[in-house]
Image (cartoon, rainbow, N blue to C red):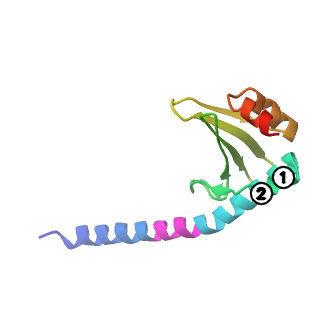
Amino acid sequence: MPHPLMLAAASKLVRAEQLRSAARTQAFHTWGARAATAASKHARRLLGDEAVTLKWEALGVLHPDDLLQATAPLGTVAGQHLELHYSGDGNHIERLALRRSCGTCPAQHLDDIDSLEHLGRLLARTPAWPTLKEQA
């Protein structure tokens, strides 16, 4: 039979983990909305009104007060999956990047974006460019 001290320690540990889990869940609900809002505002500032149509999704909860992260899929073209990745604090330090990944290989590329024209130049270097240029 376990000693009462061992049972008390186990009980305390289980309760502490339940509290941490509830705090993470609560943080995600508020953090997720903040991340999507910050990503949307920053993308619109850099890329213009067309960025309003992006559907941002928050990524993970590691440090909810330190770093907001979100992604917005752009689609798969010519075998390449393209998405925007936002990270920042929602105010001063913000980064928007284009993530390109190959549908049939493990290769991934991440390039910072500072304007709509810059995004276009990055897209022009991808296998998706002929399809995009034709549709534009």
Q: Quadrant of residue 3?
A: bottom left
Image coordinates for residue 95, horizontal then vertical, percent? 76, 43
Q: Check the image and report above or below for 85 versus 7.
A: above
Image coordinates for residue 107, horizontal then vertical, percent? 56, 29
Residue occupying the point 70% across, 45% down: 84
Q: Amino acid at mark 1?
A: Glu
Residue 115 visible to an observer of this rendering = no
- Asked if the magenta segment contains residue 24, the reply would be yes
Seen in the image, is 136 located left or right of residue 111?
A: right
Between 56 and 74, the one nearer to me in the picture: 74
Q: Quadrant of residue 6?
A: bottom left
Q: Check the image and report above or below for 40 versus 134.
A: below
Give the number of the disc on residue 53. Answer: 2
Q: If the image is split into quadrants, where does the N terminus sit? A: bottom left
- Asked if the magenta segment contains residue 51, the reply would be no
Image coordinates for residue 32, horizontal then vertical, percent? 64, 62
How far is mark 2 from mark 1, CA to CA? Answer: 6 Å
Image coordinates for residue 27, horizontal then vertical, percent? 59, 66
Q: Which residue is mark 1?
A: 50
Q: Disc count in the image? A: 2
Q: Residue furthest top?
A: 125
Residue occupying the point 74% across, 26% down: 125
Residue 34 visible to an observer of this rendering = yes
Residue range highlighted in magenta? 19-27
Give the main secondary structure of the magenta stretch.
helix
Q: Check the image and report above or below for 52 versus 108.
A: below
Q: Are marks 2 and 1 in contact (CB under 8 Å)?
A: yes
Q: If the image is split into quadrants, where does the C terminus sit? A: top right
Label 1: how many Cα within 10 Å (few below 14, some 14–19, many 20+): few
